[in-house]
Image: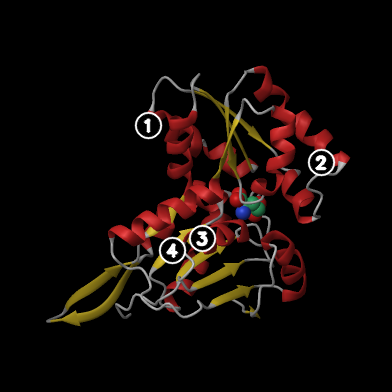
């Protein structure tokens, strides 16, 4: 492992959704190299067991550590919610041994839940906050815990929305079927009159216009991809690990299933061509 600041940021996700985080990172940190891993062969994670999600998260972390990344960004809310500790445990990398003592470098790990919770608490006026996410994220209670750590009085109303990931992957961002399903999912949250809604899943930023239309402009939408880009920029600044090269950055995408679908949908997610996408098996 080397100390050069041009080492890439490693971003990982269960599939394609983490590209919303990559898009925010590219805008916020335009000189940083990025290596992305999307587990397209095993997506979705949001409906899988905690044990399985932890096992997958460990394999991806090991893959990116071998790529010598300088920072690990867990784009996937589901992995952040249930496998954060597993990822942190693997982020301590032995780099040398001196007199039989191991020297360890710790690769910083950023996860989105704390960042989104902070922004939600800053934005809410009524302390009534809604959270939407995959079943695994909502069942973990990770968002409610993070919000209550910041403000014990906040009221959190969580709603799992398992059908939204496939609808977004289909590109149905403003389809009548999506509108109907979103309205149904949001009924209990709207009934509680939340003034802030955390979009606790990589895919939901693509539904922002629809969600805002249904909820009205009085409700703040907390975009977890933007929250992640903000904390990544702060950490890079604090630790002085920003890339000093001003040459165009390199973006490399690895996937675990044939790249064609990733490339096509990914370009829709990103609004730009992706470039190199490589198939790897973990
Ligand atoms: N990336 C997941 C998340 O943010 C959504 C897709 C999945 O279920 O794997 O929760």
User: Alpha carbon of mark 2 to alpha carbon of mark 4: how far?
Assistant: 33 Å
Q: What residue lies at 49% left-to-right and 33% top-to-bottom?
A: 120
Mark 4 nearby-residue class (10 Å; few <14, some 14–19, many ≥20) = many
| SS label for mark 1 | helix
Can you give x and y, in whole percent of width and height, for residue 263 in the image? Answer: 72, 71
Write down the quadrant of residue 207 in the picture.
top right
User: Alpha carbon of mark 2 to alpha carbon of mark 3: how far?
Assistant: 27 Å
User: Alpha carbon of mark 2 to alpha carbon of mark 1: how far?
Assistant: 33 Å
Q: What residue lies at 66% left-to-right and 46% top-to-bottom?
A: 204
Please name the colour scheme applied to the rendered image. Answer: secondary structure
Question: Does the beta carbon of the residue at mark 2 sit less than 8 Å from ligand 1?
Answer: no
Residue 25 marker = 3
| SS label for mark 2 | helix
Give the mark, 4 or 3, whose residue is nearer the N terminus: 3
Write down the quadrant of residue 1 in the picture.
bottom left
The residue under label 2 is 178
Rendered view: 118 above or below 8? above
| SS label for mark 3 | helix
Can you give x and y, in whole percent of width and height, for residue 49 in the image? Answer: 60, 49
Of marks 2 and 1, the one in the foreground: 2
The residue most toward the left is 99
Residue 149 marker = 1
The residue under label 4 is 72
Of marks 4 and 3, the one in the foreground: 3
Give the mark, 1 or 4, whose residue is nearer the N terminus: 4
């Amino acid at each position: 492992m080397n100390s050069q600041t041009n080492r890439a940021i490693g971003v990982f996700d269960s599939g394609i959704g983490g590209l919303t985080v990559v898009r925010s990172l590219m805008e916020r940190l335009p000189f940083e190299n990025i290596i992305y891993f999307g587990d397209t062969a095993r997506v979705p994670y949001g409906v899988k067991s905690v044990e399985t999600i932890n096992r997958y998260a460990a394999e991806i972390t090991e893959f990116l550590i071998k790529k010598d990344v300088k920072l690990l960004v867990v784009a996937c809310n589901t992995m952040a919610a249930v496998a954060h500790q597993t990822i942190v445990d693997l982020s301590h990398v032995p780099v040398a041994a001196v007199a039989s003592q191991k020297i360890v470098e710790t690769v910083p790990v950023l996860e989105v839940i704390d960042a989104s919770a902070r922004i939600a608490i800053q934005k809410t006026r009524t302390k009534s906050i809604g959270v939407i996410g995959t079943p695994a994220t909502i069942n973990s209670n990770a968002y409610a815990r993070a919000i209550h750590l910041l403000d014990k009085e906040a009221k959190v109303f969580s709603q799992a929305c398992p059908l939204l990931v496939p609808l977004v992957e289909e590109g149905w961002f403003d389809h009548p079927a999506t509108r109907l399903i979103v309205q149904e999912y949001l009924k209990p949250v709207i009934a509680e009159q939340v003034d802030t809604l955390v979009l606790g899943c990589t895919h939901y930023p693509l539904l922002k216009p629809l969600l805002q239309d249904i909820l009205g402009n009085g409700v703040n939408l907390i975009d977890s991809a933007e929250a992640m880009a903000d904390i990544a920029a702060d950490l890079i600044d604090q630790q002085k690990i920003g890339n000093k090269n001003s040459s165009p950055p390199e973006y490399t995408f690895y996937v675990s299933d044939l790249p064609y679908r990733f490339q096509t949908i990914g370009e829709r997610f990103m609004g730009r061509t992706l470039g190199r996408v490589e198939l790897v098996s973990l």
